[in-house]
């Protein structure tokens, strides 16, 4: 699972209960149906399999949930949770232009919309446009200063810009605001590695792995640094060398 998938899962992590399929014209409040479709998309993103049909959808094929979300949008174009769900669904299918349309709607008029800004910034970073990513995140940091994901994503921008000290500061803010320890440790490891401090990097990767052993990227980073004695010992401790 790559870093962008982690952000997508973070953005989509909402709870709710399932509902029977109904015609859009019969729906007065889209919240329950949108929640059900979000849950379906979460399973798809986690598995990487988009041809799992939605059992409650009238649509067949790989994009039944996406088509249902689009159908709902025709009746509820101003429902922001639906706009965000559509952005995530399109991005997960590498349809970034369509995703960007809904993100632009959400981010219009300089409103506090941190989740939309995080996803839009990730799309900009995918394109190598860190300047745009930073320009999307910094206004949201002023509008939503207590959102840990904004600071965490800014740290990723600083990493790509080879500005490790700014990255460390952004991660410290995210950590204080409650960002998960395993992600903070992994990103801190990347910044230490960028700073040519391999031993400290491997210590952070090991910390990330011990907090969440299902997240395998830290183990791979340690194995790639086993020419360093500290990293080699950590790799042996984790059972990878």
Image (cartoon, rainbow, N blue to C red):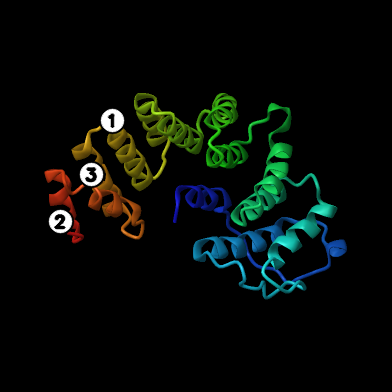
Q: Would you call the spot at circle 1 few (<14 residues within 10 Å), some (14-19), or many (20 or more)?
A: some
Query: Is 241 on the left or on the right of 190, as rendered?
Result: left
Circle 1 sits in a helix, a strand or a loop, which is it?
Answer: loop
Circle 3 sits in a helix, a strand or a loop, which is it?
Answer: helix
Q: Nearer the viewer, mark 2 or mark 1?
A: 1
In the image, residue 75 sits, relative to residue 171, either above or below, namely below
The furthest residue to the right: 25
**Residue 195, numbered label:** 1
In the image, residue 33 sits, relative to residue 134, either above or below, namely below
Q: Residue at x 28, y 34 (%)?
A: 192
Query: Is 95 on the left or on the right of 173, as rendered?
Result: right
Determine contact: label 2, label 1, CB under 8 Å.
no
Q: Would you call the spot at circle 3 few (<14 residues within 10 Å), some (14-19), or many (20 or more)?
A: many
User: Distance between the Cα atoms at labels 2 and 1?
Assistant: 24 Å
Number of callouts in the render? 3
Picture quadrant where residue 175 is located = top left
Upstream in the sequence, badge 3 or badge 1?
1
Q: Circle 2 is placed at which residue position?
A: 237
Where residue 185 appears, x then y in whole percent? 32, 42
Determine contact: label 3, label 1, CB under 8 Å.
no
Q: Circle 3 is placed at which residue position?
A: 202
Q: Nearer the viewer, mark 3 or mark 1?
A: 1
Q: Nearer the viewer, residue 44 or 39?
A: 44
Where residue 184 appears, x then y in whole percent? 36, 41
Q: Locate the N terminus and report the quarter of the image it occupies.
A: bottom left
Where residue 27 appears, x then y in whole percent? 82, 61
Q: Residue at x 62, y 71 (%)?
A: 51
């Amino acid at each position: 699972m790559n870093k962008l998938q982690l952000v997508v899962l973070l953005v989509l992590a909402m709870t709710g209960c399932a509902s029977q399929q109904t015609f859009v014209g019969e729906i007065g409040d889209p919240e329950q149906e949108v929640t059900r479709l979000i849950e379906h998309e979460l399973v798809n993103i986690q598995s990487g399999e988009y041809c799992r049909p939605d059992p409650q959808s009238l649509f067949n094929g790989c994009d039944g949930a996406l088509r249902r979300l689009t159908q709902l949008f025709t009746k509820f174009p101003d429902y922001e949770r639906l706009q965000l769900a559509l952005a995530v669904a399109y991005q997960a299918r590498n349809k970034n232009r369509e995703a960007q349309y809904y993100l632009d709607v959400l981010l219009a008029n300089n409103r506090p919309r941190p989740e939309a800004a995080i996803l839009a910034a990730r799309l900009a970073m995918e394109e190598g446009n860190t300047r745009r990513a930073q320009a999307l995140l910094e206004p949201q940091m002023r509008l939503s200063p207590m959102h840990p994901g904004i600071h965490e994503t800014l740290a990723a921008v600083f990493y790509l810009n080879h500005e490790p000290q700014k990255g460390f500061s952004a991660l410290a803010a995210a950590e204080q605001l409650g960002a998960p320890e395993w992600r903070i440790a992994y990103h801190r490891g990347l910044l230490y590695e960028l700073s040519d401090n391999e031993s400290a990097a491997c210590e952070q990767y090991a910390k990330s792995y011990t907090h969440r052993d299902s997240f395998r990227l830290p183990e791979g980073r340690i194995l790639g640094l086993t020419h360093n004695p500290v990293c080699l010992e950590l790799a042996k401790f984790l059972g990878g060398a």
